[in-house]
Image (cartoon, grey):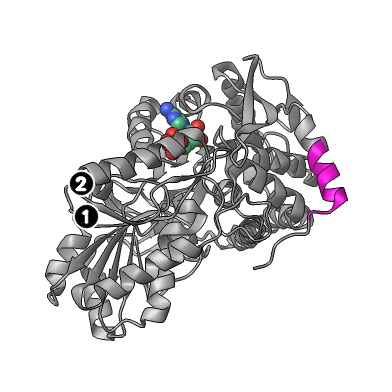
Amino acid sequence: MSSLPITEQLERRTAEFLARVHRLFIDGEWTEAESGQILEVINPATGRVLAKVQAAGAQDIDKAVRAARHAFDEGPWPRLAPPERARLMLKLADAISGARDDIAYLETLDNGMPLSSAVRAVGLATAHLGYFAGWCGKLEGRTHSVGQPDMHVYTVKEPVGVVGAITPWNFPFVMEIDKLGQALAAGCTVVLKPAELTPLSALRLAELVREVGFPKGVINIVVGHGESAGAALVEHELVDKVSFTGSTATGKWIVGAAAGNLKRVTLELGGKSPTIIFPDAELPKAIPGAAMHVFANTGQVCVAGSRLFVHRKVFDEVVAGIAEVARTLRVAPGIDPSSQLGPLVSRGQLDRVAGYIKSGVEEGARIVQGGGRLGEEGYFVQPTVMTQARSEMRMMREEIFGPVVAAVPIDEDDLDAIARHANDTQYGLAAYIWTRDVGKVHKLAGKIRAGTIHVNGGLPLDPAVPFGGYKQSGWGRELGAAGIEAYLETKAVVVRL
Ligand code: ADP
C-alpha cells in the first residue's frame, strides 16, 4: 500500500491552510459570505474541530448563480474553441497533480479515509479530468435523412447551461472533479456545492482554479449546508441543471424542488447492492473481494455489496473467511500508514450505523464478527458480519452506509430465483457475481436490475464506464459518453434548400 510520507513541509502547508477562515469562491474571487455563517469542519478521527469555513446562505448562492449565468450567457467559455477548453482543463489536471499530496492530506483529515486511499483518489480525479478534457472536441451532431427532398437537417450538441453540482462526503474530491469535468467539457458553467461535512479539498481546488486562470464565473465553489445553500441552488430559476450525488431521500426532495423552472436533474443515489457467490467461484479471490466491496471506505460507498447471498455449499466457508478479513483489517486514523479503514465521517454516521446493527439484532440477526464501536475518540467502528438475515429486516432494506454485511444462504441453482433475491430491493445500483461459469454470468447479468454488474472482481471507478442506477438509485448516468450527454442539449436545424 503506497502511503504518503507526511513531511514537515506538508504539515506546515496544511496547518497554514487549516488556520485560514476560507471564504466563498465566486466569479473568480474569494468572496465574504453575506450569510455570516461559519461552519466548523470536524476531523472524524478525533472528533475535534479541524478548520472553520464560511458557509453560503441563499443570497450567496444567488450571487454565485448569477456569476455562472453571466459567464455562460456573455463569457467566453461556451464559445471557446474546444482545444482551448481542453487546454485549460488539462492545465487544471496538472495543477491537481502538482498539489496531490496537499489535497490527499486534507482529504484524509477531513473525510477520514486512509492516506493511501486519498492519494489514489486524487490520482483518479486527475485521470478523470484528463479523460473529460478529451471530450471537448468530440461533441458531434448528425445529419438526418428526412422524408422530404430539398431539406438539409442536422443536429448539434450544445451545453445545457448553468449547472448546480451538489456532491457528497464519501469521496469528496473525485465526485467534485467528475461533475466539474463533465460540465466543463460540455461547455457549461458551474456552481459547485461540496458536502458541508467535507469541504476542504474543494476549497483547495478553488485555489488551483484561480491559479490556472479559468475565465471568471465558469467555476464557482460555495460551501454551505444542504437545507439552505443546497436547497437555494436547486430552487434557483437561473440554474439549468442540477447534478446531485447523495441520499435517496434528498434526491426525492430535489426532484420536487427543481420543478419550478423544470431544470434538468440527474441523480446518483443510494444502493443496497447484492453480492452473489456460487459454489464454483474462486473463493480465495471471492472472499477478500466480497469483503472489500462492502468494507472499503468504511462502507461509505453507494455501491457497497451489503447483501451477501452465498450458496449453502460454501456458506460457512465464505462467512468465516469474510469474518476473518473483518477481524484483521486495521482500523486506524487515516494518517497512520498502516490504516486500512478510517473512521466513519461523523458522529451522526456513527449513530446511524450503530442503529442499523442494533435493529438487525433485535429483528433476529446474529453478529458473527464486529458490531461495536472502536475506542472513545473519533468515529471508528468494527467491520461487521451478520448472519440469519431476512429480506424484511430494516438492515436488509435500507442503506446502512457503514462496514456492515448481512449474509443469507441460497440453495437455488435456479437463476430466476437468485435474481429475485438480488432484485428484492428498492435500489438498483450495482451487483457482484462470483462464479467461473460464463453462461451463468451472462444469464444472471441480464436478470439483475442494476446499473453495474461486476463479475469476479470488477474495476475501480473508470471515467469511460457509465455509472448510475435503476429504480430508486437514481436518474441518468455519469461518466463515459452517457455522462457527457447529460450536460448537453440537442438542437435540430431544419433547412429548406
Ligand atoms: P447524507 O444524508 O448521506 O449526508 P445528503 O444527501 O444529505 O446525504 O447529502 C449529500 C449532499 O446533498 C450534500 O452536499 C448536502 O449538503 C446536500 N443536501 C442535503 N440536503 C439538501 C437539500 N435539501 N437540497 C440540496 N442539497 C442538499
What residue is drawn where x is 63% and y is 26%?
Answer: 40
Three-letter code, disc 2: Met
Q: Name above or below for residue 176 compared with residue 60.
A: below
Identify the mark at residue 259; answer none if there is no mark: none
Image position, residue 362 (x, y; %): 22, 42
Residue at 25 percent of width and 72 percent of height: 315
The residue segment tinted magenta is 6-15
> Residue 286, image x and y in percent?
38, 75
Q: Residue at x 59, y 51 (%)?
A: 113
Tell me if residue 257 is in the magenta stretch: no
Dominant secondary structure, magenta: helix
- Element type where label 1 sits in the image: loop
Cβ atoms at labels 2 and 1 below 8 Å apart: yes
Q: Quadrant of the C terminus?
A: bottom left
Q: Secondary structure at mark 2?
A: loop
Q: Quadrant of ligand 1?
A: top left
Q: Alpha-carbon neighbours of circle 2 within 10 Å: few (<14), some, or many (≥20)?
A: some
**Which one is in front, 214 or 412?**
412
Front-lying residue, 159 or 407: 407
347 to 440, vertically: above or below:
above
Quadrant in which residue 418 is drawn: bottom left
Look at the image and tell me whether residue 371 can be seen: yes
Q: Position of residue 405 (x, y in %)?
A: 34, 56
User: Left or right: 375 with respect to 338?
Assistant: left
Nearest the viewer among 459 and 234 is 459
Identify residue for label 1: 389
* Residue highlighted by disc 2: 393
Tell which of 336 and 68 is nearer to you.
336
Q: Amino acid under label 1? A: Ala
Up-down relation of residue 388 to residue 351 (above or below): below
Side (left or right) of 26 relative to 146? right
Q: Where on the picture, by quarter, is residue 340?
A: bottom right
